[in-house]
Image (tube, rainbow, N blue to C red):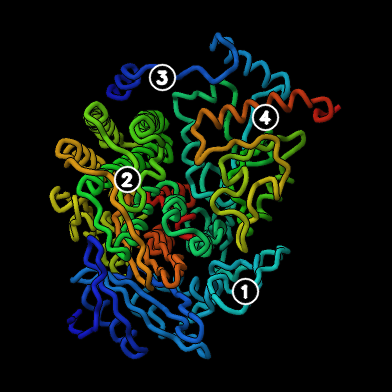
Amino acid sequence: MLISGFSLDCERLPAPLPIWRATVRNETWQVLARALSESGGRLVALWASDRTQGASGGLVIAAAYAVREGLLWLDLPLTERAATYPDLVPFFPCADRMQRAAADLLGVTAEGASDRRPWLNHGAWPEDYLPLRRQGAQKATATPRAVTDYAFVRVEGDGVHEIPVGPVHAGIIEPGHFRFSVVGEKVQRLEQRLGYTHKGIEKRFTELPPLQAHRLAGRISGDSTVAYSWAYCMALESLAGCQISERASWLRALLLERERVANHLGDLGALGNDAAFAFALAQFSRLREDWLRLANDAFGHRLMMDVVVPGGVTANVDQTTAASLAEQCDRIEREVHELRQVYDEHAGLQDRFLTTGRVLPELAARLGLTGLAGRASGQAADLRCERPWTPYDQLQVKIATQRDGDVAARVSVRFDELVESLRLIRVLLSQLPDGPTRSELRLPSKLAFGAGWVEGWRGEIFVALEYDGQQGANCIRRCHCHDPSWQNWPVLQHAVMDDIVPDFPLINKSFNLSYSGHDL
Amino acid sequence: MWRIVKLIAKNGMRSEAPPACSDDLRVGGERIQRQLLEILGQALSIRQVDAGSCNGCELEINALNNSYYNIEGLGIRFVASPRHADMLLVTGPVSRHMELALRRTYDATPDPKLVVAVGDCGCDGGIFGDSYASCGRVANVIPVDVAVPGCPPPPLEILRGILTAVRRGRSSGGEQSPA
């Protein structure tokens, strides 16, 4: 198959979205990366895997690119002696942290990469312990070591001082460390150190039965539980050749759009609050609570955890429930419309939002800003519009974009997406096809690869699954889950430059990136 | 401005009665306040610590702050520093990378202090369990007074856990309260 002018021996995975898998050689790895970066391709994920099985197999570095034809999953087999591969950072700067994470978890390194600092390993387990390697009978020592210092880049000069923040933050949020170098109130540089919530999720996947691991996927990031469990189930269904029913797809989309609305309601209130507009928080958090309570009534869980399962969904929607879900959309839409007017007319709020935390489209494109934040900086990518799978192929999702790339733009994209999702929910409810909600999923008795790709509320969620069904093993050999926060965290470092320290919480909230989804 | 005033007036008060054992819920609310005053001589200040959770528990703890639960009306508020706190509300599993930070936060909280572990992961490690990267439940790292199960527990259950810890703190208050 010809991809961006290259002839590749590709295998199409039976997923609802076009996903291709190919094995490449060392030379092609970098040449392809250059070509894809020049032709507007995006690096979606990069991870390593240990495919050793007895005497065969070995380490592999893999990359997933969004290209014109769909998603391209490339494998580059490595040799055990020199587990290195060509660096992708020159073409895709966002590869930097992903490459460092691969080095921490599997000991494979990028040749010539300038940043060799550990990323996920803070020193709590020994350097020679590689959690995701199969061989070597490696055991982590139980005794915790002192968490190592991190070599932050120092900013020198007259009047420069540092403000360390975290890992325990001054609010009800996830842990991470931010190191600000400031002059007066102005931020000269922000450097992040993440990995505090790393709890060994990818290793845990290999210990769980494939038909139960969707529960773990649904707990990678609590705010994106539907997106992750859908992506995981899509991967498992694709490798098992399981076609879910039309009704199940529609119900999954209903859940996914409800998750988007829930998060946008929460964020819009919090953004107002971070600009000292407490009224907004009170109003939006009331709407969010109404939204979650009805989710609990309709699907049995406020955040809709464990509703998406391999083969379909556990919940069904009857006429009465459908009516109350649709009625709630009308009510919330009316209230959101009123609140948007309040936001637009509030001079103090707009003063804080406009031009704050700006990422212009050129920078966004260069650094690979993705998802909701990307769309607020002119990066018009949304899987629901670009690669509409069932049921999105029948919904004509309207993409929300802005070009200003500031907090105001990200607020505006949230408002637009919220209203669009409310429309989608009503359409989904009114045209819900009949049929079963769950199909049988038979795991194959061979080695198999599957992939899932879903547009969550934050951006595209990708899951790469390697399964072994030989001799009744029926186990997950590797499950890599990718959160769009990997791409967007480094861009946040640029967004705050030249803004003042007190604007950081506002800018940070406008991106609202995941720690847990990134740290795994 | 008029729009804001109109919306405030239109939406009115949405606060609901707190969970309590009393039949008369209003009295329950007052009793909670009285108990808080008796045990602490002040309102209850809580420092929340995410020691490695998936963020699900944080969403529900945040929901506690919405107008329906009205926790500030009960005299409970979340504070930014452990030095201002009477209680730590900890979600987990405690990742190895957060172990030290959690211990330091605990040490920085003045005595007498209460610890409430929130969520299945905080109670027993949950689906993540113990591993090279996870210490499991919160009690593996710091002493825990009350553990609230659920994945995540809904706001009302979290509030119930907080109140239970305060009550239990009072019954063993003899040793705990400073002379």
Determine the residue positioned at 40% across, 48% down: A225
The type of residue carrying mark 2 is Val
In-image side of A392 versus A131 (left or right): left
Identify the residue position indicated by label 2 in the image: A313
Q: Are marks 2 and 1 in contact (CB under 8 Å)?
A: no
Identify the residue position indicated by label 1 in the image: A129
Q: Is residue A507 above or below residue A471?
A: above
Say few, some or many: other residues with alpha carbon within 10 Å of mark 3 (under 14 / 14 to 19 / 20 or more).
few
Q: How far is disc 2 from disc 4 in space, using C-alphas?
A: 38 Å
Q: Is residue A387 visible?
A: yes
Identify the residue position indicated by label 4 in the image: B165
Circle 2 or circle 3, nearest the eye: 2
Numbered tag placed on residue B14 in the rendering: 3
Q: Chain of mark 3?
A: B
Question: What element does badge 2 sit on?
Answer: strand
Say few, some or many: other residues with alpha carbon within 10 Å of mark 1 (under 14 / 14 to 19 / 20 or more).
some
**Which corner quadrant of the image does residue A38 belong to?**
bottom left
